[in-house]
């Protein structure tokens, strides 16, 4: 048993990482059993679930969409805000109920929530029907724990792992678009954020392993690769090889994947060379998610974001100037401790300046153990809600404006699947990452096609296939 430990996470030092060649030979001891896997949170978790699914299937199980049919339930959880936490606890109630009827049911809780000390304490005290708890830093332990089937809760959470697993095999959910992890963890310690605790220290994968994985995807006909990490543009800093994200991006682009993307990049780690590489390669998509969090330098400092409003603006201007047709989206938090109306107005001001293509907006949510949880949360809920509403009005206006500009234009769309709502339509994404519902047959799926945009809404576009 290993429990999460915040002191260990906070006081970690830079040590050399260890590469672990993951053992993919798994004994199929769960033949004829069914698993139910539910994923919460960001792309990182969705991608981790591809690995989890692979292990469950290697053990001999098949998937079910119905909780009641499951022999093994895995919840891959998110801890970013209070409501993410509440959803999981709510769902655990259903699992508990099912276990009463099906005592042999195995329940595993994974993901970011179990990196939180208080959550694991709560699971141990109040949810003893949960059998297995595995953290994000050692997903590869899941098969072992499922095979062991210990009587009591089996908990393995590493808060300060120096391991970089390599040679992980998994079946991707999509045959068109693939995520490739280039690094794990985060060392930024933005004061509001739980991720550096739940995902551990920043560590980069080996250059040659990433390139090999990407080359394989190209050879298998993938149309799109998204390089994944909490701070992709901090890639390589821990390797001390004089090789950074700009170098990696360039080398992956040269492998010839039709579309290359990355998420998320931190403004503080963005260099001019990275912008130049993005501008240079046609297959690096003109789309950057560049979280700002706040437009007030005073609040940014309290958030430990490491840039001022002016520095962000400068970076934004450089991107717009150098990368033709670039779309930029962002994340914004309102109601951080101590945020005044003036601070908030500065956030609105920068939104009006940047006219983002889109933005994810959040009300500040206190996470136990983070630095901001020791600051006084002095903005009333009423005020937070009013700020969010005003912010969303501005954000939605600009996102719609940027969509309206595309009407009657012909844009390249990677078609990824049939439309849920209309059987005569398919959907896909423009190079600038805008969602388009396209009139056209399913034969377009997996292809990059020209689409004429006919209508624009705040969050999507309509179009017709033209070639
Ligand atoms: N690594 C990414 C973001 C990860 S979390 C980055 O740094 O950009 C995604 C977003 O959730 C963050 O950008 C932030 O806007 C929001 N977020 C994180 N912690 C939060 C908290 N405690 N309360 C509200 N929003 C939060
Ligand atoms: Fe969280 Fe900041 Fe790291 Fe993003 S950069 S994951 S917001 S600590
Ligand atoms: Fe992602 Fe949620 Fe963890 S946003 S990194 S799954 S806390």
Image (spheres, grey):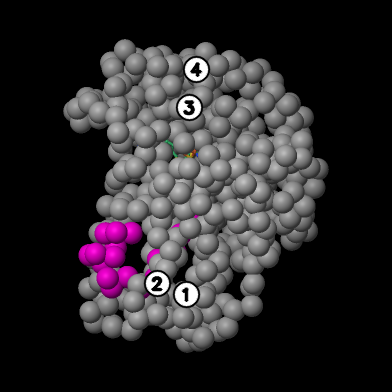
| Distance in Å between CA atoms under marks 2 and 4 | 45 Å
Whether residue 293 appears in this view of the structure is yes
Query: Compared to 134, does 259 lie above or below?
Result: above
Q: Is residue 130 found inside the magenta-colored segment of the image?
A: yes
Determine which of the numbered discs, if any, sits on residue 305 in the image: 3
Determine which of the numbered discs, if any, sits on residue 308 in the image: 4
Which residue lies at the image location 51% right of the left edge and 52% below the top edge?
A: 160
Query: Compared to 5, does 238 lie above or below?
Result: above
Residue tagged 2: 154
| Distance in Å between CA atoms under marks 1 and 4 | 46 Å
| Distance in Å between CA atoms under marks 1 and 2 | 7 Å
Asked which quadrant contains residue 367, the reply is top left
| Distance in Å between CA atoms under marks 2 and 3 | 37 Å
In primary-sequence order, the first of circles 3 and 1 is 1
x, y percentage for residue 23?
A: 64, 72
Query: Compared to 374, does 19 lie above or below?
Result: below
Q: For the magenta stretch, what is the residue range?
A: 120-136
Task: Please name whichever residue, 441 or 33, is drawn nearer the observer in this view of the structure.
Answer: 33
Ligand 2 neighbours mark 3 (CB distance < 8 Å):
yes
Residues under numbered marks 3 and 4 in contact, where contact means CB atoms less than 8 Å apart? no
x, y percentage for residue 234?
A: 62, 37
Ligand 3 neighbours mark 1 (CB distance < 8 Å):
no
Residue tagged 1: 145
Please tell me whether mark 2 or mark 4 is closer to you in this view: 2
Residues under numbered marks 1 and 2 in contact, where contact means CB atoms less than 8 Å apart? yes
Q: Is the residue marked by circle 1 packed among few (<14), some (14-19), or many (20+) residues within 10 Å? A: some
Q: Is the residue marked by circle 3 packed among few (<14), some (14-19), or many (20+) residues within 10 Å? A: many
Ligand 2 neighbours mark 4 (CB distance < 8 Å):
no
Determine which of the numbered discs, if any, sits on residue 185 in the image: none
Residues under numbered marks 2 and 3 in contact, where contact means CB atoms less than 8 Å apart? no
């Amino acid at each position: 048993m290993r429990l999460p430990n915040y002191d260990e996470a906070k006081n970690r030092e830079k040590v050399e990482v260890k590469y672990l060649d993951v053992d993919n030979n798994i004994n199929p001891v769960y033949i004829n059993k069914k698993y139910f896997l539910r994923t919460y949170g960001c792309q990182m978790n969705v991608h981790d679930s591809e690995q989890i699914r692979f292990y469950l299937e290697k053990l001999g199980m098949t998937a079910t969409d119905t909780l009641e049919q499951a022999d093994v339930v895995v919840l891959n959880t998110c801890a970013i805000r209070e409501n993410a936490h509440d959803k999981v606890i709510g769902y655990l109630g259903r699992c508990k109920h099912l276990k009463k009827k099906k005592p042999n049911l195995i329940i595993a809780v994974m993901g970011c929530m179990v990196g939180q000390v208080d959550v694991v304490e709560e699971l141990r005290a109040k949810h003893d029907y949960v059998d297995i708890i595995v953290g994000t830093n050692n997903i590869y332990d899941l098969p072992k724990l499922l095979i062991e089937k210990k009587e009591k809760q089996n908990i393995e959470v590493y808060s300060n792992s120096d391991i970089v697993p390599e040679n992980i095999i998994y079946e991707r959910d999509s045959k068109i678009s693939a995520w490739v992890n280039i690094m794990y963890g985060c060392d930024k310690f933005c004061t509001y954020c739980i991720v550096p605790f739940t995902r551990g220290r920043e560590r980069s994968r080996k250059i040659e392993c990433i390139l090999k994985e990407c080359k394989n995807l190209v050879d298998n006909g993938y149309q799109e690769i998204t390089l994944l990490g909490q701070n992709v543009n901090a890639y390589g800093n821990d390797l001390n090889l004089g090789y950074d994200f700009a170098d990696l991006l360039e080398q992956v682009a040269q492998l010839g994947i039709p579309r290359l993307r990355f998420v998320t990049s931190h403004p503080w780690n963005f260099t001019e060379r990275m912008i130049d590489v993005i501008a240079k390669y046609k297959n690096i998509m003109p789309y950057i998610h560049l979280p700002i969090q706040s437009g007030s330098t005073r609040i940014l400092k309290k958030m430990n974001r490491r840039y001022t409003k002016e520095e962000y603006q400068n970076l934004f201007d450089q991107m717009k100037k150098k990368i033709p047709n670039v779309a930029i989206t962002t994340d914004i938090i309102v109601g951080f401790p101590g945020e005044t109306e003036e601070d908030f107005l500065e956030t609105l001001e920068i939104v009006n300046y940047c006219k983002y293509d889109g933005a994810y907006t959040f009300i500040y949510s206190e996470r136990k153990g983070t630095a901001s949880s020791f600051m006084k949360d002095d903005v009333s809920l009423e005020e937070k809600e009013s700020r969010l509403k005003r912010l969303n009005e501005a954000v939605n206006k600009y996102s719609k404006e940027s969509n309206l500009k595309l009407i009657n234009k012909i844009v390249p769309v990677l078609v990824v699947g049939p439309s849920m709502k209309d059987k005569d339509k398919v959907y896909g994404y423009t190079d600038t990452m805008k969602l388009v519902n396209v009139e056209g047959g399913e034969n377009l799926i997996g292809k990059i096609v020209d689409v004429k945009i006919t209508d624009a809404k705040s969050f999507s576009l309509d179009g017709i296939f033209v070639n």
